[in-house]
Image (cartoon, rainbow, N blue to C red):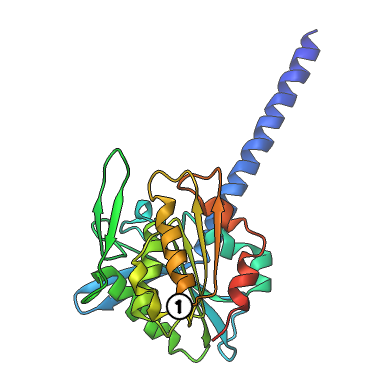
């Protein structure tokens, strides 16, 4: 009986050790994957913008690649140049996607005290309301993103006919605003659980294809904001797709990133 107890105990210990090693290996692999997004900083006068950039596998500067700009949500703001990779980066780090869709991918980070979009926000227990005013200059952070995009798009290895922008929540709001401010720039855009100024869509409706996503049960950004944007875009002649997930709350980015045709659609667009 003592032998059986010893054998059982040793087997459990071995299982624990193997499980622990696999966990450590997985965590290391995760860290290594994220580190493929190189850390960088844009310095403009006295202002700085932290960002991460992913180059294609076997990057060849003599070739031309599409560029993807992705704007994170409010929860990923900060100054660590890390949190902006929480949502969305895995999609572009996926090895099959990197092989099938080689691209330069940029994830900038908005400081904690700032906001991508120029928005007046009223928060309440009955729901948040958003009003957007794109007149005048953009918020500092979005202005820096626009300068960063200008710099990278001038590189000879960037295909200027295949510039894409996307974002979720606050980043979806930033996506609609940057489209309005740079109407001749992007071939396609993805806006997830965002909102925008429906009166601004005429600037870019006939120039950029869009795919808009939202959760029907979103209690942070009402899906009516996306519906209103899509309605205005269609009225202005835009080529826009709209996916409303019946059971999704604010995290509609999860099913959106899982859409099997998302990247195929995105990278098929060209100016």
Seen from the viewer's position, the closer of residues 6 and 132 is 132
Seen from the viewer's position, the closer of residues 62 and 104 is 104
Q: Which residue is mark 1?
A: 205
**Is residue 41 visible in this depiction of the protein?**
no
Tell me the element at label 1. loop
Q: Is residue 55 above or below residue 16?
A: below
Left or right of 17: which side holds 4? Answer: right
Residue visible at 52% across and 45% down in the picture: 248
Residue 199 location (% of width, % of height): 33, 71
Quadrant where the C terminus sits is bottom right
Residue visible at 34% across and 74% down in the picture: 200
Quadrant in the rendering for residue 108: bottom left
Quadrant in the rendering for residue 227: bottom left
**Is residue 97 visible in this depiction of the protein?**
yes
Residue 54 location (% of width, % of height): 51, 71
Residue 23 location (% of width, % of height): 61, 42
Seen from the viewer's position, the closer of residues 76 and 189 is 189
Quadrant where the N terminus sits is top right
């Amino acid at each position: 009986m003592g032998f059986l107890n010893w054998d059982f105990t040793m087997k459990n210990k071995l299982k624990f050790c193997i499980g622990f090693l696999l966990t450590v290996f997985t965590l290391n692999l995760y860290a290594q994957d994220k580190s493929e997004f190189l850390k960088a900083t844009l310095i403009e006068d006295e202002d700085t913008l932290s960002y991460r950039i992913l180059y294609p596998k076997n990057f060849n500067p003599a070739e031309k690649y599409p560029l993807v700009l992705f704007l994170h949500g409010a929860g990923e703001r900060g100054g660590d140049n890390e949190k902006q990779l929480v949502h969305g980066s895995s999609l572009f780090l996926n090895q099959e996607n990197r092989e099938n869709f080689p691209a330069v991918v940029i994830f900038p980070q908005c400081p904690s005290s700032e906001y991508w979009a120029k928005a007046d926000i009223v928060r309440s227990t009955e729901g948040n309301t958003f009003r957007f005013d794109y007149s005048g200059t953009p918020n500092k952070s979005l202005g820096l993103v626009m300068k960063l995009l200008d710099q990278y798009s001038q590189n000879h290895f960037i295909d200027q006919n295949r510039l894409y922008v996307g974002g979720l929540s606050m980043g979806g709001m930033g996506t609609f605003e940057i489209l309005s401010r740079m109407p001749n720039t992007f071939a396609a855009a993805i806006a997830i659980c965002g909102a925008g100024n429906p009166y601004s869509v005429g600037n870019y409706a006939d120039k950029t294809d869009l795919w808009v996503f939202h959760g029907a049960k979103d209690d942070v950004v009402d899906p009516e904001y996306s519906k209103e944007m899509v309605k205005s875009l269609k009225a202005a002649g835009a080529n826009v797709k709209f996916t409303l997930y019946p059971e999704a709350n604010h995290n509609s980015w999860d099913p959106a990133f899982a859409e099997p045709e998302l990247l195929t659609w995105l990278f098929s667009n060209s100016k």
